[in-house]
Image (spheres, rainbow, N blue to C red):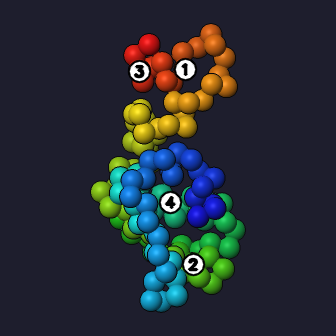
Amino acid sequence: MDALASETEIMESCRDLTWWRGADAGWHIEWRDGPHASEVAEMLAALVPSAVAATTSPVTARLEVVGIPFVLRAVDPLGRRRVLARRDLWRLAEALDVSRPTATRHPWEELLGG
């Protein structure tokens, strides 16, 4: 979860993010909307050197990290490209970012029509 937390765009785009310990002593991570499971598996493999992806598809992905199996499942995924292009109120971190120069419009100004 720490590796996923470093990618705020992914975490903020996922609805109903849940995880639980499976009967196989592995972890199951499931979310609604957000990126495809294969995209998350690729991202985790890039962030965690010991991660090895076994099988991936847009909806499910299986990988192993330090000998622990993970099953990723995306319910009704949008895909990362669509998630990054989407500008809604749920993108709270970007909307509240006031560190940008004042010469440009802040994201919250665009969201609220100001």
Q: Is residue 99 above or below residue 70?
A: above
Identify the residue under disc 4: 40
Element at badge 4?
helix
- Which circle's residue, 4 or 3, is located before the other in the chain? 4
Q: The disc labelled 2 sits on which kind of residue?
A: Glu
- Residues under labels 2 and 1: Cα distance? 40 Å
Residue 108 rendering spot, x and y as whole percentages: 49, 24
Identify the residue under disc 3: 112
- Which circle's residue, 2 or 4, is located before the other in the chain? 4
Q: The disc labelled 1 sits on which kind of residue?
A: His
Figure label count: 4
Please indicate, yes or no, whether residue 90 appears anywhere in the rendered image.
yes
Q: Nearer the viewer, mark 2 or mark 1?
A: 1
Identify the residue under disc 1: 106
Residue 11 rendering spot, x and y as whole percentages: 51, 52
Residue 88 rendering spot, x and y as whole percentages: 39, 33
Residue farthest to the top, as pictured: 103
- Which circle's residue, 2 or 1, is located before the other in the chain? 2
Label pair 2/4, CB-CB below 8 angstroms: no
Circle 4 crowding by C-alpha within 10 Å: few under 14, some 14–19, many from 20: many
Label pair 2/1, CB-CB below 8 angstroms: no
- Residues under labels 3 and 1: Cα distance? 10 Å
Residue located 52% across and 64% down the image? 41
- Residues under labels 2 and 4: Cα distance? 13 Å
- Residues under labels 4 and 1: Cα distance? 29 Å
- Residues under labels 4 and 3: Cα distance? 31 Å
Identify the residue under disc 2: 64
- Say which of 90 and 68 sits in front: 90
Q: Nearer the viewer, mark 4 or mark 3?
A: 3
Residue farthest to the bottom, as pictured: 24
Q: Is residue 46 above or below residue 71?
A: above
Q: The disc labelled 3 sits on which kind of residue?
A: Leu
